[in-house]
Amino acid sequence: MAEIINNPSTMERIREEIDSVVGKSRLIQETDLPNLPYLQAVVKEGLRMYPPIPVFGRRLQEGCVMGGFYVPEKTTLVVNGYAVMRDSDYWEYPDDFKPERFLSSSRSEQEDATKEKVLKYLPFGSGRRGCPGTNLAYILLGTAIGMMIQCFDWKIEGDKVNMEETLSGMVLTMAHPLKCTPIPRGLPIIKDP
């Protein structure tokens, strides 16, 4: 949300997408997410820049060669997902919030981009040892962020949110927690079933 607040054009584009797909008479639902590609791109970009677990480990079951070096079996490999997802060799302007990098114009381009990014986009780990809750996380984040943008304007003190980070245990957090005031937009009206 802090990145979205710092980028008003992103918030406006998400609102336009939600209004065109969902309308103004109901809240965004899980079933709407496949039709909201820009919202999905915003979620992915947020996870790329701020992964839930920036460092994760793997234990090798058998020896192998990596980067020209032999690595024996039972070696613990530590992967810095944060550094991989901000590597300028793989990402153009890696420190900038650009959800558009996850949008593709055609289905074949999207499939090629997915295959290419699989090894450099690691917010929940990768492969067989990746987080089993990945799909649930995308659904929950998409609907939560969608509702917060659909239903509220967000007011902050100053012009921009301070995005400085600090390490708290194994998790990155904001050095200055986000403080913002939600201002109801008056949409949509929720009725009891």
Image (tube, grey):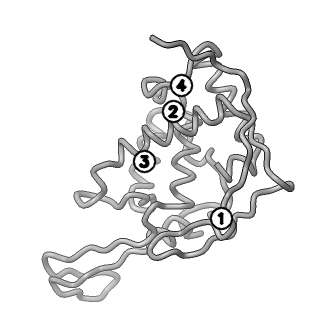
Q: Are marks 4 and 2 in contact (CB under 8 Å)?
A: no
Expressed as whole percent of the image width and height from the top left, the position of residue 27 reads 56, 22
Question: Tag 2 or tag 3, which sits nearer the N-term?
Answer: 2
Above or below residue 16? Residue 172 is: below
Instruction: Name above or below for residue 123 compared with residue 171.
Output: above
Q: Position of residue 69 (x, y in %)?
A: 29, 88
Number of other residues with Cα within 10 Å of mark 2, as a class: few under 14, some 14 to 19, many 20 or more: few
**Which is more foreground, mark 4 or mark 2?**
4
Q: Determine the CA span between mark 2 and mark 1.
A: 26 Å
Residue at image coords 53%, 25%: 28
- Residue at position x 73%, y 26% from top? 185
Q: Amino acid at mark 3?
A: Thr
Give the labeled residue for mark 1.
95
Q: Which residue is mark 3?
A: 114
Residue occupying the point 83% across, 54% down: 157
Say which label, 4 or 2, has the lower sequence index.
Answer: 4
Helix, strand or loop at label 3? It is helix
Query: What residue is pinned by disc 4?
Result: 28
The disc, 1 or 4, on the residue closer to the chain's N-terminal end is: 4
Amino acid tagged 1: Asp
* Pointer 3 or 4: first along the chain: 4
Residue 49 is situated, as x and y percent measured from the top left of the image, at 57, 60
Residue type indicated by callout 4 = Ile
Real-space CA distance between mark 4 and mark 2, rounded to the nearest whole angstrom:
25 Å
Q: Residue furthest right?
A: 158
Percent across and percent down for residue 85 are 51, 64
Label 4 SS? loop
Q: Which mark is residue 106?
A: 2
